[in-house]
């Protein structure tokens, strides 16, 4: 794997006297090339037109110390390097068009140089996965003989141990996007209503999951070390949701908890569900889970505070299905029966992939759903996202979706009651549903670390946003009402009112 580093020229820090004396000074950019244990294959140095000479000196010193490194002299001029909007847009344009190959290369961005605003912009690009890499820091090695040498250290913002750094950057980023895209709220916080006023908050409370599904769109797994809100912060969000519901008369405000696996941490998430139920009403709290950890006692507790639970079942229990761990469907099936026994409405969802073209899979599954008196059956289409990005060939074409939809309707038509109520997801081709994008107009997402996003699905691998524009704010820092009333939220409402296309697939950001 090659190591590729990007960095802004430090117009002060990288500047030194001419002649041999320049090696008496620690210059962050040059010092990156002083560690034999940290070889660098490629380096891109950004500088403005006015600093060409300094950039050449720095590049030539790097060449002297590391002749094997491929060097790139990148001109990026800023009228005002402390202006967030300008730095963001120019950096965004550059990296949007850069052909990253994360499977082959390790990417790092040196933040020891550049203005504070540049550092925040780099953070936001990494956080949004526009730059699929890590931050890089360097400090002087304090070597009297070689004062120019440094100690590089990388920072993976996705890791829990860097939670504080991530929080600090995010707070500043949120403040900056407020200045960039958001204006003082001029309208009440109520979500936009329509004929059937419903506003849905999809709250992904955790990245952690007991399973490790090969194509998990959330990139969840048992030992994930990504940062998530504390219990106290989650309970505070439950109060913020209550405020939204109270300020939106006539709008049915509903929250669905998902993950990861919500029930993996029952000690925190059962009280959270109870509080949400008190704040929003039992019928306005839903749970999407895998069925893990729902024993009889838990099913009973859930029945007291929640109206419906949805689990995933791509094939009937006992039927081999690649990409899901063994016992995954059995666990969902057993929990479905326990929950039904306690009076909870149970929905199962199936994510259609190429495997469902085998008619037996859908037939066996449908028979199981009927036998077990499942209330709802939701049909979704597989979109390559998260770890699913590695399985693009599982995705069905639009025609294939339409064909499978017909087959499911036939199964349903041939069967007399009792049978589950069918629900085709609005993005499944052939559903004839209003397929206008829901971003903010009908729904928002909250991520485990507190980011409020226009679409719950806007998360790529490692929990990074696919595009920074999906970030609406941070529920640990702002009231949700402020987030919903912002100009940025209004931007998405307008987008959804005017576009049928899924913003994730088609939004170019203009
Ligand atoms: S797909 Fe669901 S159950 Fe599977 S690892 Fe991801 S979050 Fe867990
Ligand atoms: S971006 Fe796509 S997935 Fe997200 S709300 Fe819009 S249509 Fe739905």
Image (tube, rainbow, N blue to C red):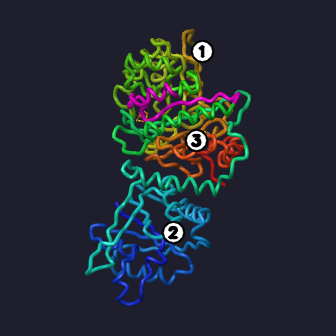
Q: CA distance from mark 2 to mark 1?
A: 64 Å
Q: Position of residue 448 (x, y in %)?
A: 47, 40
Q: Position of residue 204 (x, y in %)?
A: 49, 37
Check the image and report above or below for 356 versus 409.
below
Q: CA distance from mark 3 to mark 2?
A: 31 Å
**Which marked residue is nearer to the observer: mark 2 or mark 1?**
2
**Identity of the residue drawn at 68% across and 39% down:** 189
Q: Specify which label sits upstream in the sequence, 2 or 1.
A: 2
**Could you tell me which secondary element the residue under label 2 belongs to?**
loop
Dot 3 alpha-carbon crowd within 10 angstroms: few under 14, some 14 to 19, many 20 or more: many
Q: Position of residue 265 (x, y in %)?
A: 39, 31
**Identity of the residue drawn at 58% across and 29% down:** 403
Q: Is residue 428 visible?
A: no
Q: CA distance from mark 3 to mark 1?
A: 34 Å
Queried on whether the Cβ of the residue with tag 3 lies below 8 angstroms from ligand 2, the answer reads yes
| Location of mark 1 (residue) | 413
Q: Specify which label sits upstream in the sequence, 3 or 1.
A: 1
So how many labels did they put on this image?
3
Q: Quadrant of residue 156?
A: bottom left
* Depth order, front residue of 91/386: 91
Check the image and report above or below for 158 versus 146.
above
* Residue occupying the far bottom of the picture: 19
Give the numbered dot on residue 115: 2
Assess whether residue 277 is covered by the magenta stretch. no
Q: Which residues are magenta?
A: 249-275
| Location of mark 3 (residue) | 455
Give the numbered dot on residue 156: none
**Which marked residue is nearer to the observer: mark 3 or mark 1?**
3
Do the numbered discs 2 and 1 sit on residues whose CB atoms are within 8 Å? no
Q: Specify which label sits upstream in the sequence, 3 or 2.
A: 2
**Could you tell me which secondary element the residue under label 3 belongs to?**
loop
Dot 1 alpha-carbon crowd within 10 angstroms: few under 14, some 14 to 19, many 20 or more: few
């Amino acid at each position: 794997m090659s190591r590729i580093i990007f960095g802004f020229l430090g117009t002060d820090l990288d500047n030194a006297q001419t002649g041999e004396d320049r090696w008496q000074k620690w210059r962050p950019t040059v010092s990156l090339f002083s560690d034999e244990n940290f070889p660098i294959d490629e380096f891109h140095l950004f500088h403005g037109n006015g600093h060409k000479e300094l950039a050449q000196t720095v590049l030539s010193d790097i060449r002297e110390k590391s002749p094997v490194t491929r060097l790139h002299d990148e001109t990026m001029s800023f009228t005002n390097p402390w202006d967030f909007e300008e730095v963001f847009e120019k950096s965004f344009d550059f990296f949007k068009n850069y052909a990253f190959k994360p499977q082959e290369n390790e990417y790092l961005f040196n933040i020891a140089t550049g203005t504070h605003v540049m550092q925040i912009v780099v953070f936001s690009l990494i956080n949004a996965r526009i730059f699929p890499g890590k931050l890089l820091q360097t400090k002087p090695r304090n070597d009297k003989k070689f004062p120019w040498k440094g100690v590089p250290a990388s920072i993976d913002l996705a890791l829990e141990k860097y939670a504080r750094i991530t929080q600090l950057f995010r707070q500043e980023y949120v403040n900056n996007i407020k200045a960039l895209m958001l204006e003082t709220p001029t309208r009440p916080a109520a979500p936009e209503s329509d004929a059937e006023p419903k506003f849905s908050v999809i709250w992904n409370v955790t990245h952690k999951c007991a399973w490790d599904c090969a194509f998990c769109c959330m990139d969840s797994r048992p030992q994930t070390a990504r940062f998530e809100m504390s219990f106290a912060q989650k309970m505070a969000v439950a109060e913020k949701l209550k405020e939204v519901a109270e300020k939106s008369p006539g709008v049915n405000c509903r929250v669905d908890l998902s993950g990861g696996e919500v029930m993996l941490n029952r000690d925190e998430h059962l009280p959270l569900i109870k509080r949400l139920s008190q704040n929003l009403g039992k019928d306005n709290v839903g749970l999407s889970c895998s069925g893990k950890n729902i024993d009889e006692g838990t099913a009973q507790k859930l029945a007291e505070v929640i109206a419906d639970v949805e689990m995933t079942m791509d094939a009937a229990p006992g039927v081999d299905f690649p990409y899901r761990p063994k016992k995954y469907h059995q666990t969902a099936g057993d929990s479905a029966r326990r929950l039904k026994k306690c009076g909870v409405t149970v929905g199962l969802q199936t994510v259609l992939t190429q495997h469902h073209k085998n008619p037996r899979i859908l037939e066996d599954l449908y028979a199981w759903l009927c036998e077990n008196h499942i209330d709802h059956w939701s049909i979704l289409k597989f979109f390559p996202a998260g770890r699913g990005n590695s399985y693009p060939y599982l995705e069905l074409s639009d025609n294939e979706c339409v064909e499978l939809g017909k087959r499911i309707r036939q199964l349903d038509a041939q069967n007399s009651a009792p049978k589950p109520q069918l629900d085709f997801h609005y993005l499944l081709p052939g559903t004839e549903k209003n397929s206008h994008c829901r971003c903010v107009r009908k729904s928002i997402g909250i991520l485990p670390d507190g980011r409020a996003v226009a679409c719950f699905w806007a998360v790529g691998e490692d929990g990074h946003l696919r595009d920074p524009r999906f970030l609406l704010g941070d529920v640990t820092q702002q009231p949700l009402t402020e987030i919903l009333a912002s100009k940025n939220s209004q931007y998405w409402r307008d987008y959804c009112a005017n576009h049928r296309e899924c913003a994730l697939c088609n939004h170019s950001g203009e």
